[in-house]
Amino acid sequence: MLRLLIAVDGSEHARNAIDAAARLGREGEVEAVLVHIREGHTYHGDLTPRDYERIAEQALAQQSQVLEGALAHALKAGLARVETLGEEGTPDVDIPRIATLRAADMIVMGTRGLAAVSALLLGSTAQRVVHNATVPVLLVK
Protein backbone atom coordinates (compact mmCIF):
# COMPACT_ATOMS: atom_id res chain seq x y z
CA MET A 1 0.00 0.00 0.00
CA LEU A 2 1.43 3.35 -1.09
CA ARG A 3 0.64 6.08 1.44
CA LEU A 4 0.59 9.58 -0.07
CA LEU A 5 0.19 13.00 1.44
CA ILE A 6 -1.22 15.30 -1.25
CA ALA A 7 -1.00 19.03 -0.53
CA VAL A 8 -3.95 20.95 -1.98
CA ASP A 9 -4.78 24.63 -2.29
CA GLY A 10 -7.59 24.71 -4.83
CA SER A 11 -5.32 25.51 -7.75
CA GLU A 12 -5.02 23.77 -11.11
CA HIS A 13 -1.56 22.61 -10.03
CA ALA A 14 -3.05 20.90 -6.98
CA ARG A 15 -5.62 19.14 -9.17
CA ASN A 16 -2.76 18.00 -11.41
CA ALA A 17 -1.00 16.64 -8.32
CA ILE A 18 -4.12 14.63 -7.43
CA ASP A 19 -4.24 13.25 -10.99
CA ALA A 20 -0.57 12.27 -10.82
CA ALA A 21 -1.08 10.57 -7.46
CA ALA A 22 -4.00 8.58 -8.87
CA ARG A 23 -1.72 7.27 -11.63
CA LEU A 24 0.92 6.02 -9.18
CA GLY A 25 -0.91 2.80 -8.36
CA ARG A 26 -3.81 0.62 -9.28
CA GLU A 27 -7.16 1.23 -7.65
CA GLY A 28 -7.05 0.32 -3.98
CA GLU A 29 -3.24 0.35 -3.85
CA VAL A 30 -2.97 4.03 -2.96
CA GLU A 31 -4.03 5.52 0.35
CA ALA A 32 -4.08 9.31 0.29
CA VAL A 33 -4.47 12.17 2.73
CA LEU A 34 -5.42 15.48 1.14
CA VAL A 35 -4.01 18.22 3.34
CA HIS A 36 -4.65 21.94 3.25
CA ILE A 37 -2.66 24.23 5.51
CA ARG A 38 -4.45 27.44 6.39
CA GLU A 39 -1.82 30.06 7.06
CA GLY A 40 -2.31 32.03 10.26
CA HIS A 41 -1.91 35.75 9.77
CA THR A 42 -1.07 38.56 12.11
CA TYR A 43 -3.37 41.50 11.57
CA HIS A 44 -2.54 45.00 12.67
CA GLY A 45 -4.60 48.11 12.85
CA ASP A 46 -8.04 48.88 14.09
CA LEU A 47 -9.57 45.42 14.00
CA THR A 48 -12.04 44.46 16.67
CA PRO A 49 -12.23 40.97 18.19
CA ARG A 50 -15.32 40.40 16.02
CA ASP A 51 -13.26 41.26 12.91
CA TYR A 52 -10.68 38.64 13.89
CA GLU A 53 -13.46 36.13 14.47
CA ARG A 54 -15.02 36.86 11.07
CA ILE A 55 -11.63 36.51 9.32
CA ALA A 56 -11.04 33.16 11.06
CA GLU A 57 -14.53 31.93 10.10
CA GLN A 58 -13.94 32.89 6.45
CA ALA A 59 -10.57 31.13 6.43
CA LEU A 60 -12.14 27.95 7.83
CA ALA A 61 -14.96 28.10 5.28
CA GLN A 62 -12.49 28.53 2.44
CA GLN A 63 -10.39 25.63 3.75
CA SER A 64 -13.46 23.39 3.88
CA GLN A 65 -14.37 24.39 0.33
CA VAL A 66 -10.84 23.60 -0.93
CA LEU A 67 -10.83 20.20 0.80
CA GLU A 68 -14.33 19.29 -0.44
CA GLY A 69 -13.35 20.16 -4.01
CA ALA A 70 -10.10 18.23 -3.75
CA LEU A 71 -11.90 15.19 -2.34
CA ALA A 72 -14.44 15.21 -5.17
CA HIS A 73 -11.61 15.50 -7.70
CA ALA A 74 -9.62 12.69 -6.04
CA LEU A 75 -12.60 10.32 -6.11
CA LYS A 76 -13.28 11.18 -9.75
CA ALA A 77 -9.57 10.59 -10.57
CA GLY A 78 -9.84 7.07 -9.13
CA LEU A 79 -8.44 7.42 -5.62
CA ALA A 80 -10.72 5.28 -3.47
CA ARG A 81 -8.98 5.47 -0.09
CA VAL A 82 -8.87 9.18 0.63
CA GLU A 83 -9.25 11.34 3.70
CA THR A 84 -8.96 15.08 4.20
CA LEU A 85 -7.09 17.08 6.79
CA GLY A 86 -7.21 20.82 7.37
CA GLU A 87 -4.80 22.53 9.71
CA GLU A 88 -3.51 26.00 10.47
CA GLY A 89 0.19 26.62 10.19
CA THR A 90 2.99 27.17 7.71
CA PRO A 91 2.86 24.91 4.63
CA ASP A 92 6.60 24.43 4.19
CA VAL A 93 6.96 23.29 7.80
CA ASP A 94 3.65 21.54 8.42
CA ILE A 95 3.36 19.51 5.21
CA PRO A 96 6.60 17.59 5.95
CA ARG A 97 5.62 17.31 9.65
CA ILE A 98 2.24 15.80 8.81
CA ALA A 99 3.85 13.46 6.26
CA THR A 100 6.08 12.12 9.03
CA LEU A 101 3.21 11.82 11.53
CA ARG A 102 1.05 10.01 8.97
CA ALA A 103 3.93 7.72 7.90
CA ALA A 104 3.51 8.88 4.28
CA ASP A 105 5.74 7.25 1.69
CA MET A 106 5.70 10.39 -0.45
CA ILE A 107 4.45 13.96 -0.58
CA VAL A 108 2.73 15.00 -3.81
CA MET A 109 2.12 18.66 -4.52
CA GLY A 110 1.70 21.12 -7.31
CA THR A 111 4.10 23.87 -8.14
CA ARG A 112 3.28 27.13 -9.78
CA GLY A 113 6.51 26.94 -11.78
CA LEU A 114 8.21 30.17 -10.75
CA ALA A 115 10.75 31.48 -13.23
CA ALA A 116 14.28 30.36 -12.38
CA VAL A 117 15.43 33.82 -11.27
CA SER A 118 12.34 34.41 -9.11
CA ALA A 119 12.74 31.01 -7.51
CA LEU A 120 16.37 31.76 -6.67
CA LEU A 121 15.53 35.13 -5.16
CA LEU A 122 12.27 34.31 -3.43
CA GLY A 123 12.20 30.55 -3.05
CA SER A 124 8.89 28.75 -3.17
CA THR A 125 6.76 26.70 -0.85
CA ALA A 126 7.46 23.61 -2.96
CA GLN A 127 11.22 24.13 -2.71
CA ARG A 128 11.03 24.59 1.04
CA VAL A 129 8.89 21.45 1.40
CA VAL A 130 11.51 19.50 -0.57
CA HIS A 131 14.21 20.89 1.72
CA ASN A 132 12.29 20.07 4.94
CA ALA A 133 10.84 16.70 3.96
CA THR A 134 12.23 13.37 5.11
CA VAL A 135 10.34 11.48 2.40
CA PRO A 136 10.43 11.84 -1.39
CA VAL A 137 8.47 14.76 -2.83
CA LEU A 138 6.79 14.60 -6.24
CA LEU A 139 6.29 18.09 -7.70
CA VAL A 140 3.67 18.37 -10.43
CA LYS A 141 3.06 21.27 -12.84
Image (spheres, helix red, strand yellow):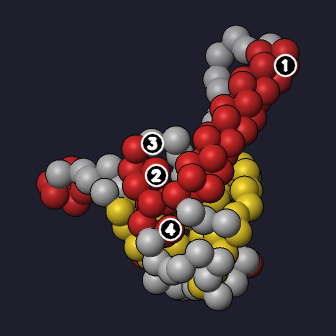
| Residue 89 placement, left or right of 137 | right
**Is the residue under label 2 in contact with that under label 4 (CB below 8 Å)?**
no
Q: Earlier in the sequence, mark 4 or mark 3?
A: 3
**Amino acid type for the residue under numbered disc 3:** Ser
**Disc 2: which residue:** 14
Disc 2 to disc 3, how far (Cα)? 5 Å
**Residue 113 against residue 79 in the figure, above or below:** above
Viewer-side label of 4, 2: 4
Q: Which mark is residue 11?
A: 3
Q: What residue is rendered at 24% in x and 51% in y?
A: 114
Q: Is residue 81 visible?
A: yes
* In front of the other: 128 or 6: 6
Task: Name the residue type under label 2.
Answer: Ala
| Dot 1 amino acid type | Pro
Mark 1 closeness class: few <14, some 14–19, many ≥20 residues within 10 Å: few
Q: Which element is circle 2 on?
A: helix
Residue at 51% over, 80% down = 25
Tag nearer the camera, 3 or 1: 3
x and y percent of residue 11 in the render?
Answer: 45, 42
Q: Which mark is residue 49?
A: 1
Compute the Cα span from label 4 to label 2. Answer: 13 Å
Residue 46 x %, y %: 70, 11
Say which residue appears at 72% left-offset and 77% top-offset.
102
Residue 118 against residue 43 in the figure, above or below: below
The quarter holding residue 44 reads top right
> Mark 4 — residue?
22
Asked if the residues shown at circle 2 and circle 3 are in contact, with their CB atoms under 8 angstroms apart, the answer is yes
Give the CA distance from mark 4 to mark 1.
43 Å
Question: How far is the residue under mark 4 from the one under mark 3?
Answer: 17 Å
Q: Residue furthest bottom?
A: 1
| Residues tagged 3 and 1 counted as in contact (Cβ below 8 A) | no
